[in-house]
Amino acid sequence: MAVLLPKYKHGNGMMSKEPVPDANLLNDTQNLQVTVTPDKTYLVRIINMGAFAGQYFWIEDHTLTIIELDGSYTQPTTAEMIYLSSGQRCSFLLTTKSEVGRNYPFMASMDRSLFMMAGHVNANATGWLVYDSSQPLSSPSQVDEYNPIDDMTISPYDQTPLLRKPDQSIRLNINMKHANGASYYFFNDIAYSSPEVPTLYTALTSGESAAHFATYGMPCNPWVLQRNQVIEVILYNRHMTNHPVHIHGHHFQAIWRSEPGGGDFPSSTMTDDDFRQIPVTRDTIVVPNGGSVVIRFRADNPGVWLLHCHMEWHAETGLAATFIEAPLDLQQQQQLRHITADQLTLCTAAGIELPHDSDNATLEQTGNPAAVASESTTDRQRALRYAD
Ligand SMILES: [Cu+2]
């Protein structure tokens, strides 16, 4: 990533075409063998830890019983195939067959519709459930089409009903552009860039100003959320491929999703009665190309949380926004008086310049904004310019 990212960002013939993986891997290998015994139920946890490609996954002649998505337990739901975008997770129960006598392949197949760059790709990784090591490892059968279960149809284990009547509705348009030889991804025409003062410290040190979005500067695409309100985010994907959008700090309800190419969410004609009444709960959702998705969550977790595309290339070139949730409550909770040594280590690792005078590394919650970075151009100064 560190080698490829500058090339991706600045062209070099790639024209923001994401590097295509050379090969697919299961547990860092190919031809993975998992020994199983008959008549037994296994819990299988699976994560797409890749930076870019979505994955189809299935086990030949076996049914998966999904019980968890992205850390949120679900009603047991059977599926023949699942799709995991980068960053998505799933747990399923797998009951093995009674008879022994052959072994069964399982497959992970990369979603090649995402690939803009031509070239040879070994998109499939095969492994085997090994019932009998004396038997051959047969080749997987061809599939005619990918037909994974629609995650929107899966309901949460606790049957939490739809969060109705959102207090705040946030619209985010996904798009990308080339400019000056570089490529950028946008939510609402803003390509995220990291503020000079980390947003958390701005929230903790700017007193009542922390409750105003302009305090944070537009480059971090800030949205201030009020405590315990129902927040709705409508994601419009104006781009030609899908984007898996992930939020920190919450599981959300995914209450509506269009088909690919399905256009904008018809907000003027939809009411709460038109949504799934017990919607799927997860933290990463695929927003289809040329389509849209509606998610909701309750702002009950004060903090500074990123919402971003889980494809690393896009997150790195701007597809991120910052939710500053209940910042005044956060100030009360954190009672942060000093930047700890741990945090200073993080700053150093992130290349954030520290004040020369160590006394300046003290945060006082006096209502005096941006206490840690009074020099140079600060996030707050940018914000004030914006406010003008
Ligand atoms: Cu993306």
Image (spheres, helix red, strand yellow):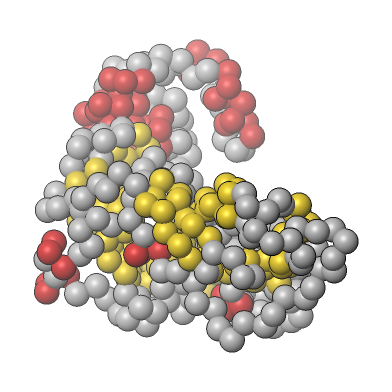
Please give left or right for residue 153 compared with residue 317 in the image: left
Q: Percent from the top left, x then y, of residue 290?
A: 38, 78
Give above or below for 134 relative to 220. below
Query: Outermost residue toward the front?
Result: 99
Residue 105, quarter of the rendered image = bottom right
Q: Taking 268 as reference, is 302 left or right?
A: right
Residue 185 x %, y %: 47, 65
In the displayed structure image, the side of residue 333 where residue 273 appears, left or right: left
Relative placement, left or right, of 65 versus 251 is: right
Looking at the picture, does residue 70 appear above or below residue 116? above
Would residue 197 be visible to someone looking at this image?
yes
Query: Is 105 located above or below residue 201 in the figure?
Result: below
Q: Which residue is drawn at 63% across and 60% down?
A: 97
Name the quadrant containing residue 62: bottom right
Q: Identify the image quadrant of the N terminus.
A: bottom right
User: Residue 188: where, in percent of width, then height?
Assistant: 33, 64
Instruction: Name the foreground residue: 86 vs 264.
Output: 86
Residue 320 against residue 302 in the figure, above or below: below
On the question of residue 369 being in view, the answer is no
Residue shown at 85%/58% (left/top)? 133
Q: Which residue lies furthest to the bottom in this view?
A: 144
How many circles with numbers are drawn on the protein? 0
- Which of 100 and 211 lies nearest the eye of the viewer? 100
